[in-house]
Amino acid sequence: MTKKTVFCSKHIATMQVGQPYGMIENGAVAMDGSSIVWVGPQSEIPSPYTDWPQVDFGDRLITPALIDAHTHVVFGGNRAVEFEMRLNGATYEEIARAGGGILSTVNGTRAASEQDLLAGALPRVDTLLAEGVSCIEVKSGYGLDTETELRMLRAARRIAQERPVRVKTSFLGAHAIPPEYSGRGDAYIDDVCIPTLRAAHAEGLVDAVDGFCEGIAFNPAQIERVFKVAQELGLPVKLHAEQLSNLGGARLAASYGALSADHIEYLDAEGVAGMASSGTVAVLLPGAFYTLHETQQPPVELLRAQNVPIALATDCNPGSSPLTSLLLTMNMGCTLFRLTPQEALAGVTCNAARALGLSDTGTIDAGLRADLAIWDVTHPTELAYRIGFNPLYKRIFGGVE
Ligand code: DI6
Ligand code: FE
């Protein structure tokens, strides 16, 4: 017998389309085991749910649990010193070209065991979960050799064994050119990145394939070679695109039916149109924008006009976004990118689910997983409005507290 419960609350933001926030006042959610079986007004609860035990959360707000659709939480080493360097005048690109940046984390990650990587990631994951997160995406990309890329992905998978959270992995072998392939990006793609993708896939470690299309990383032709292999293996793609310049990465990703194009501050109208036609989600990463003092705004108006779904994620990583708060990310999305609080909540629920190719989570609806967050606030606007305040009352993961 599965556990059957009905949660009642004055405010349920289902995030279903319809009214703002999919709001149901004086609502109820019926859950059978790990699934939601019904949601609606308390006055309309159908049988047999009327007979199930009820928990009344009173004036609290229930939302879908949050989803962080872009993280690099698994890594070794520490880059606090680069924060200092940037404040003394060095740019992110200069530090990267001088062998710091991503490559510094590569050294730290290569030196770390799977257990070290897991132990380093868990406190970051715990901080996210404490804000009602039920699902995180985790990328490789700090190994850049077969052994370390696989180790990162194994550590990522283990997070879901150690904690009540879902993990979706992305293979990011095309993140940076490792020192031993300096100046030989093509050879790295052929000799390391692609064979490693095949090995990781064979081990069941890959849910999606990502890349970094940028002057300091890989050009579109190199990314496309990786995407072709992803396509052959039946894996969805996504891309770090147009973060520091416009190389047409989002358009390329869209032409491969990408789940998402991420960062996209330098995206142009053509790129937006490409994303619109392929249903690619725009994952905005205000933590990186903020940390790098970026001034180029992502084209939010164009994305809205073309109905491109917008997600928000932490991009939690040791360099450009040492951020482990999805609530603060929502606030930044509103204040820095002028998203509305409703867009911000959609960005970390329904649209984040879409960015991960998940159709069983992200809204409160019959048939979906019972992944919920219950908050000590009465209106969802407060989740994005407040700064550095965590009103989480309870997190429900697959129907379990
Ligand atoms: N863009 C990012 O925001 C992360 N990777 C990427 O391609 C940052 C990686 C880092 O600085 O460690
Ligand atoms: Fe990233």
Image: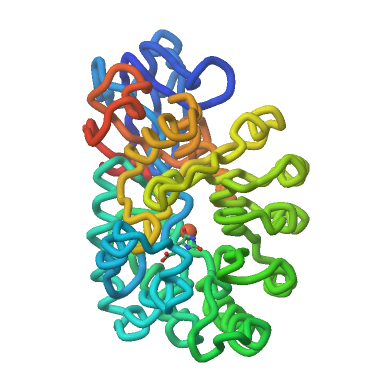
Residue 50: where, in percent of width, then height? 37, 18
As displayed, is residue 306 above or below residue 315? above
- What's the colour scheme? rainbow
Residue 239: where, in percent of width, then height? 61, 59
- Tell whether 194 sits left or right of 138: right
Is residue 197 visible in the rendered structure shown here? yes
As displayed, is residue 295 above or below residue 59? below
Relative depth, front residue between 58 and 286? 286
Please tell me which residue is depicted at 56% across the width and 69% down the height of the picture. Answer: 216
Q: Quadrant of residue 166?
A: bottom left
Residue 147: where, in percent of width, then height? 45, 87
Q: Quadrant of residue 380?
A: top left
Q: Quadrant of residue 100?
A: bottom left
Is residue 7 visible in the rendered structure shown here? no
Please tell me which residue is depicted at 77% across the width and 55% down the height of the picture. Answer: 255
Please tell me which residue is depicted at 30% across the width and 60% down the height of the picture. Answer: 88
Relative depth, front residue between 85 and 8? 85
Count numbered badges in the picture: 0
- Tell whether 251 sits left or right of 3: right
Q: Residue furthest front?
A: 89
Where is the N terminus found, in terms of image quarters? top left
Residue 266: where, in percent of width, then height? 61, 48
Where is the C terminus found, in terms of image quarters? top left
Relative depth, front residue between 303 and 115? 303
As displayed, is residue 221 above or below residue 125? below
As displayed, is residue 365 above or below residue 114? above
